[in-house]
Image (spheres, grey):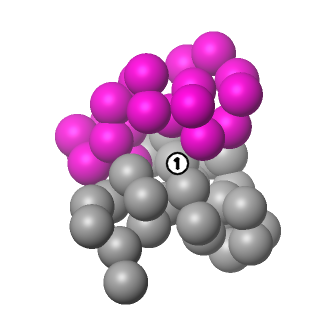
């Protein structure tokens, strides 16, 4: 269904299945980049 982690996490965030704090953890783990975090949330990392 998803081609990469960015698409999956974006979908989860839009569905409210993932919160901003969780996405920040994914950045710290190297799963998504700070730029991708900003694209998903609209918030500066």
Q: Is 12 in front, or is 26?
A: 12
Q: Which residue is mark 1?
A: 23
Quarter occupied by the C terminus? top right
- Residue 36 magenta: yes
SS class, disc 1: helix
* Rendering coords of residue 18 (x, y %): 64, 65
* Rendering coords of residue 11 (x, y %): 59, 66
* Rendering coords of residue 22 (x, y %): 55, 54
- Residue 41 magenta: yes
| Residue located at (57% from left, 26% from top) | 38
- Magenta region: which residues? 26-45
The answer to which image quadrant residue 19 occupies is bottom right
Q: Is residue 31 left or right of residue 40?
A: left
| Residue located at (35% from left, 73% from top) | 2
The answer to which image quadrant residue 17 occupies is bottom right
Figure check: 38 above or below 5: above
| Residue located at (57% from left, 31% from top) | 39
| Residue located at (33% from left, 41% from top) | 32
Figure check: 5 above or below 42: below
Q: Is residue 12 left or right of residue 9?
A: right
Q: Is 14 in front, or is 45?
A: 14
Characterize the local packing of mark 1: few (<14), some (14-19) or many (20 or more) Cα atoms within 10 angstroms: many
């Amino acid at each position: 269904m998803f081609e990469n982690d960015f698409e999956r996490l974006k979908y989860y965030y839009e569905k409210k299945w993932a919160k901003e704090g969780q996405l920040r953890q994914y950045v710290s783990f190297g799963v998504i980049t700070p730029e991708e975090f900003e694209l998903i949330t609209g918030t500066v990392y």
